[in-house]
């Protein structure tokens, strides 16, 4: 957080309060946790793509992170990991499955540094990070710089060889397309237009920088 500038900090605060207000006012987020099929369809991925990413991981239990989701997708992939969701509304059945797989649900605001601190305390590095907020993306990220901040946080917990797949706000697409088309040491990126929301894929390679070299403002 120390590296972000004052104007981004105040935008983050304002957006975080807005997200909180939406929840507190009873105008709730659509709460559902989709499975692999919906993630792949809406992220414009071929059927079986997420499974194949998991199958390529060797030497340790595959770890996934479901951002703005309840981890249902991770249970379908039968992998461990964590999920960050504003509230914990899991059914008993989902809670039990996640416990068995070692998935930890962090009920927190993705725009709050504290939420990321709670994640980092788990000391996990993730092989697959999925960020499919659905329509929710418009309510939390109307500013490209905030979206970039979330991606920075995600990057810091992505393991070497790991893949981040994110829905992105339409406003960020032109900048992301230019950024992804350039060569960056230690990562491969692509940004493509999809039916609902553009999709960004970043793969973390050997010698990846600690900080994602991405600035959107
Ligand atoms: C439209 S649902 C999508 C859920 C899931 N990713 C899926 O694809 O089924 C949006 C989710 O974002 C979560 N959410 C909304 N605002 C959030 C915030 N500021 N921080 C963390 N999660 C948030 C909600 O709790 C809800 O589960």
Image (cartoon, grey):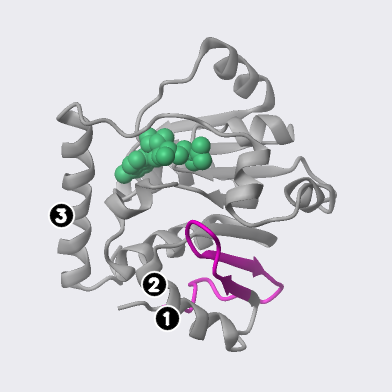
- The answer to the question of whether label 2 and label 1 lie on touching residues, with beta carbons closer than 8 A, is yes
Residue 168 position within the rendered picture, expressed as x and y whole percent measured from the top left = 45, 62
Residue at position x 70%, y 72% in the image? 205
Residue 30 position within the rendered picture, expressed as x and y whole percent measured from the top left = 37, 32
**Is 143 on the left-hand or right-hand side of 123?**
left
In the depicted view, which residue is nearer to us: 67 or 115?
Answer: 67
Residue at position x 22%, y 73% in the image? 5
- Label drawn at residue 175: 1
- 10 Å crowding of disc 1: few (<14), some (14-19), many (20+): some
- The answer to the question of whether label 2 and label 3 lie on touching residues, with beta carbons closer than 8 A, is no
- Per the model, the C-alpha gap separating discs 2 and 3 is 19 Å
Residue at position x 16%, y 38% in the image? 21
Assign ligand 1 to one image quadrant.
top left
- Per the model, the C-alpha gap separating discs 2 and 1 is 6 Å
> Which residue is labeled 3 in the image?
14
Helix, strand or loop at mark 1: helix
Residue 69 position within the rendered picture, expressed as x and y whole percent measured from the top left = 48, 37
Q: Is mark 2 within 8 Å of ligand 1?
A: no
Decide if residue 121 is in sight here: no
- 10 Å crowding of disc 2: few (<14), some (14-19), many (20+): some
Helix, strand or loop at mark 3: helix
Residue 163 position within the rendered picture, expressed as x and y whole percent measured from the top left = 66, 60
> Which residue is labeled 2 in the image?
172
Instruction: Specify start and end residues of the magenta stretch as a single range.
Output: 189-214
The vertical placement of 146 against 86, above or below, is: below
Decide if residue 209 is in sight here: yes
Residue at position x 76%, y 40% in the image? 61
Helix, strand or loop at mark 2: helix
**Tag 1 or tag 3, which sits nearer the N-term?**
3
């Amino acid at each position: 957080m120390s590296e972000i500038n004052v104007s981004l900090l105040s935008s983050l605060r304002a957006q975080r309060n807005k997200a909180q207000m939406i929840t507190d006012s009873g105008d709730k987020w659509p709460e559902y946790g989709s499975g692999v099929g919906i993630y792949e369809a809406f992220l414009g991925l071929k059927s079986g793509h997420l499974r194949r990413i998991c199958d390529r991981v060797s030497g340790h239990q595959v770890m996934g992170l479901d951002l703005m989701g309840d981890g249902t997708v991770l249970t379908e992939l039968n992998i461990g990991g964590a999920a960050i969701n504003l509230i914990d509304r899991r059914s008993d059945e989902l809670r039990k499955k996640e416990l068995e797989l070692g998935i930890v649900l962090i009920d927190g605001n993705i725009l709050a540094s504290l939420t990321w601190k709670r994640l980092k305390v788990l000391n996990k590095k993730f092989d697959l990070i999925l960020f499919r907020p659905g329509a929710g993306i418009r309510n939390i990220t109307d500013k490209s710089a905030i979206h970039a901040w979330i991606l920075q946080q995600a990057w810091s917990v992505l393991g070497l060889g790991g893949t981040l797949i994110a829905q992105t706000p339409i406003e960020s697409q032109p900048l992301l397309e230019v950024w992804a088309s350039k060569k960056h040491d230690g990562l491969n990126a692509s940004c493509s237009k999809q039916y609902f929301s553009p999709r960004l894929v970043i793969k973390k390679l050997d010698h990846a920088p600690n900080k994602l070299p991405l600035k959107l403002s």
